[in-house]
C-alpha cells in the first residue's frame, strides 16, 4: 500500500489483540474513556487518498518496538523517530509501544500526543503490554524499560531483576521479531542486559545487538571541546571502551580535535587522566544528584544518534562507539561480552569494528578492568543465559553512572 498523509482515519482497531478478540478498541477521538484491557489506537490511512507524487519514493514502512514507552527517555525519543529525524524523510514508520499494567494509561497519553503532532511519516501506533505481541515483525527493538535500583538492593539483585526481564524480552524477540531486527539496549545494566537478551534470542544475529554507550561518547566530545575551546563538532574519533559503568574508558589517546591528536591540542595529561576521565565515568550520577532523576533528553538524543550511525555511512576516517559482541574482536577482549568499541557503518544497519587503534599502557590497564567487570557480571547472570554453575563475584566498585 502506498503511504501518504490524509485525514481519513479508518475505524480504530487493535492490531496487538488477536483477531477475533478485537473489541472495545481504545481509540477515542473525542476523548471518551473505555475499559479495553490494552490501550491501542491504530492510524490506518486510506490509500486512495494518497498524494502519490509525495509518497512515490517512500521506502516500505518499518516497525519500531520500544519498551519503557511511557517513560521519560521515550517521551523524547518517540517524537524524534516519528518526525523522520532518525530514518529520513522518505521512511514511514510504525511505532509499537510496550508498557506495563502500571503504565498502560500513561501510554495512551503518549499515543494521544503522537496523534496530535500530525507527523506525516508516522503511519501506525500500537500499544501493548505483551512483548510477544508488541515485538511482532519488529525491524528495530529499543529496549529502554528497566527497573531502577531500589533502596537496600544489592547490585546482584539489580542484575537478577532486570536480567529476568531481558531474558523474557529476548525470548519474545526470538519468536516474533524479524530475523534481521536490530536491538538497542538502554535499560541498565545495559551491556549485560544486552548479553542476556542476545542469549535468549538465538534466531537473531548476535551482531545486531547493541548496548548504548553513545551517550558517554557525546558527553566526552562535549567536555573535550569545552576544554579545547572549540565547537564540539570538531571533536571526532572518540571511543568509549567497555561497560556503561564507572569503569568505562573514554579514549582521549585516539581522539581528534579539528583533525589533530587530542593530546596535542589539549596538552594537559593530568587533566585528561584525572579530571576528564572520571568526569565522563560519573557524569550520569552527577546529573541524577543535580536533577533528581536519570538523564532522559540527552539519552534519547544519543539513542537517535546511535541509530542514525547505523543507517548512515560513517564519515571517512571517523567512527562511533557502541557496545557490541566481542566475538572475533581485534583488541583481544574476551569473547562473549557486550563491550563498547569503535565501530563504523556503511549505512545498511550493520557495522564493523575499527581496527588499529593505539592502545597504550594507560588505556590497556583500564580497558582490562572494564572487561573484568563485564566478565563478572556475565557470571552472575549465566543462569539467565542457559549456563549453570558460574561463580558470581560483584566487585565493590561496580557501579552504574547513576549509582555514585
Ligand atoms: C546515565 O548514564 O545517565 C544513566 O545510565 C545513569 C543511570 O544509572 O541511570
Image: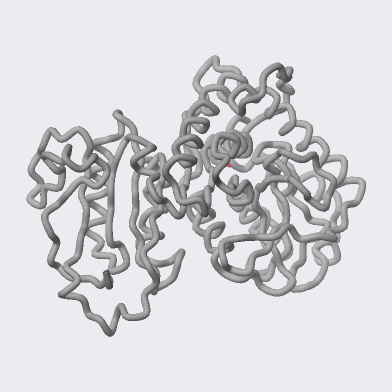
Task: Ligand 1: give its quadrant.
Answer: top right
Q: Is residue 218 above or below residue 136?
A: below
Res 292 seen here: no
Q: Please, is residue 373 above or below residue 242 in the view?
A: above
145 left or right of 17? Answer: right
Query: Residue drawn at (63%, 39%), measured in percent from left and top?
Result: 191
Q: Residue furthest bottom?
A: 53
Which image quarter holds the N terminus?
Answer: bottom left
Residue drawn at point x = 14 percent, y = 68 percent? 7
Q: In the shown orientation, is residue 244 left or right of residue 5? A: right
Image quarter in which the C terminus is found: top right
Q: Position of residue 113 (x, y in %)?
A: 25, 53
Q: Residue at x 52, y 48 (%)?
A: 183
Where residue 21 sits, quadrant-wise, is: top left
Res. 75 in view:
yes
**Nearest the eye: 158 or 42:** 42
Depth check, front residue: 78 or 288? 78
Q: Residue 365 appears at what percent x and percent y?
A: 87, 40
Residue 83 in the figure: left or right of residue 269:
left
Residue 261: where, in percent of width, then height? Answer: 82, 66
In the image, residue 170 lies at what x, y percent?
51, 37
Amino acid at each position: 500500500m502506498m503511504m501518504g498523509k490524509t485525514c481519513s482515519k479508518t475505524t480504530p482497531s487493535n492490531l496487538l489483540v488477536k483477531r477475533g478478540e478485537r473489541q472495545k478498541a481504545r481509540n477515542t477521538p473525542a476523548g471518551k474513556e473505555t475499559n479495553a484491557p490494552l490501550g491501542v489506537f491504530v492510524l490506518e490511512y486510506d490509500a486512495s487518498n494518497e498524494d502519490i507524487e509525495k509518497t512515490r519514493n517512500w521506502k516500505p514502512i518499518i516497525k519500531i518496538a520500544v519498551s519503557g514507552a511511557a517513560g521519560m527517555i521515550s517521551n523524547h525519543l518517540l517524537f524524534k523517530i516519528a518526525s523522520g529525524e532518525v530514518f529520513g524523510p522518505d521512511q514511514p514508520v510504525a511505532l509499537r509501544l510496550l508498557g506495563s499494567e502500571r503504565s498502560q494509561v500513561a501510554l495512551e497519553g503518549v499515543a494521544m500526543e503522537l496523534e496530535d503532532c500530525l507527523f506525516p511519516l508516522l503511519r501506525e501506533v500500537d500499544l501493548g503490554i505483551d512483548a510477544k505481541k508488541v515485538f511482532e515483525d519488529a525491524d528495530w527493538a529499543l529496549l529502554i524499560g528497566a527497573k531502577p535500583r531500589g533502596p537496600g538492593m544489592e547490585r546482584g539483585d539489580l542484575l537478577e531483576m532486570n536480567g529476568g526481564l531481558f531474558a523474557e524480552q529476548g525470548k519474545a524477540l526470538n519468536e516474533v521479531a524479524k530475523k534481521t531486527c536490530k536491538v538497542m539496549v538502554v535499560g541498565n545494566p545495559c551491556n549485560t542486559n544486552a548479553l542476556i537478551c542476545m542469549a535468549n534470542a538465538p534466531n537473531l544475529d548476535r551482531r545486531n545487538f547493541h548496548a548504548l554507550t553513545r551517550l558517554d561518547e557525546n558527553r566526552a566530545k562535549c567536555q573535550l571541546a569545552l576544554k579545547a575551546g572549540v565547537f564540539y563538532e570538531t571533536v571526532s574519533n572518540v571511543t568509549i571502551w567497555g561497560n556503561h559503568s564507572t569503569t568505562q574508558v573514554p579514549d582521549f589517546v585516539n581522539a581528534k580535535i579539528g583533525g589533530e591528536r587530542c593530546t596535542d591540542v589539549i596538552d594537559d595529561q593530568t587533566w585528561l587522566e584525572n579530571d576528564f576521565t572520571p568526569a565522563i565515568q560519573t557524569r550520569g550520577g552527577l546529573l541524577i544528584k543535580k536533577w533528581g532523576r536519570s538523564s532522559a533528553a540527552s539519552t534519547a538524543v544519543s539513542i537517535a544518534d546511535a541509530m542514525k550511525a547505523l543507517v548512515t555511512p560513517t564519515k571517512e576516517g571517523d567512527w562511533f562507539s557502541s557496545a557490541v559482541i566481542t566475538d572475533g574482536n581485534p583488541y583481544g577482549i574476551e569473547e562473549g561480552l557486550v563491550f563498547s568499541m569503535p565501530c563504523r557503518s556503511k549505512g545498511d544497519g550493520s557495522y564493523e569494528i575499527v581496527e588499529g587503534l593505539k592502545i597504550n599502557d594507560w588505556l590497556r590497564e583500564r580497558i582490562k578492568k572494564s572487561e573484568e567487570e563485564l566478565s563478572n557480571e556475565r557470571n552472575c547472570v549465566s543462569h539467565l543465559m542457559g549456563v549453570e554453575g558460574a561463580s558470581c563475584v560483584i566487585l565493590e566498585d561496580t557501579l552504574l553512572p547513576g549509582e555514585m
